[in-house]
Image: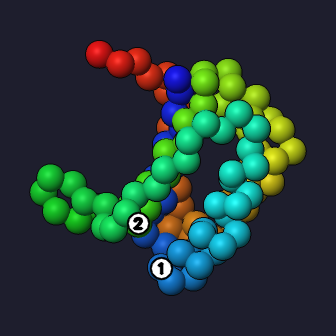
Amino acid sequence: MAQLMVMYKTPKDTAAFDKHYYEMHVPLAKKIPGLRRYEVSNGPVETPAGPSAFHLIAILTFDSVAAVQAAFGSAEGKVAATDVQKFATGGADMILFDTREV
């Protein structure tokens, strides 16, 4: 399996971010081909020492890194990626990795 982790930094307007994210972005992202699972953080994103700079973390699961790359090369993936610019006013960090159970 592979995961794409999107770490959304605290936006200028959290209410506007949440509204767009859940009403517009999630439905777009769920159309991405090959998406197996879509999870988001629930409540504040914190560190062991306290608050973090992140408002929301999304974890998208695919079969492989190649599947993630193919998914974001698709029309649906491009639409979802472009949509991030519309609401992520604090910016977003994205990381991609294969996983294995240990």
Disc ID at residue 55: 2
Q: Label 2, secondary structure: give it.
A: strand
Kindly tell me whether residue 65 is visible in this rendering.
no
Dot 1 crowding, Cα within 10 Å, few <14, some 14–19, many 20+ = some
- Above or below 23: residue 30: above
Rendered location of residue 61, percent (x, y) = 55, 36
**In the displayed image of the protein, which residue is found farthest to the left?**
49
Rendered location of residue 11, percent (x, y) = 49, 73
Quarter-wise, where is residue 84 in the image? bottom right
Q: Are marks 1 and 2 in contact (CB under 8 Å)?
A: yes
Look at label 2 and name its amino acid: His
Residue identifier under label 1: 14
Left or right of 24? Residue 9 is: left
Q: CA distance from mark 1 to mark 2?
A: 8 Å
Q: Label 1, secondary structure: give it.
A: helix
Left or right of 86? Residue 47 is: left
Rendered location of residue 21, percent (x, y) = 60, 68
Look at label 1 and name its amino acid: Thr
Q: Which residue occupies 12% across, 57% down?
A: 49
Query: 49 or 21: which is nearer to us?
Result: 21
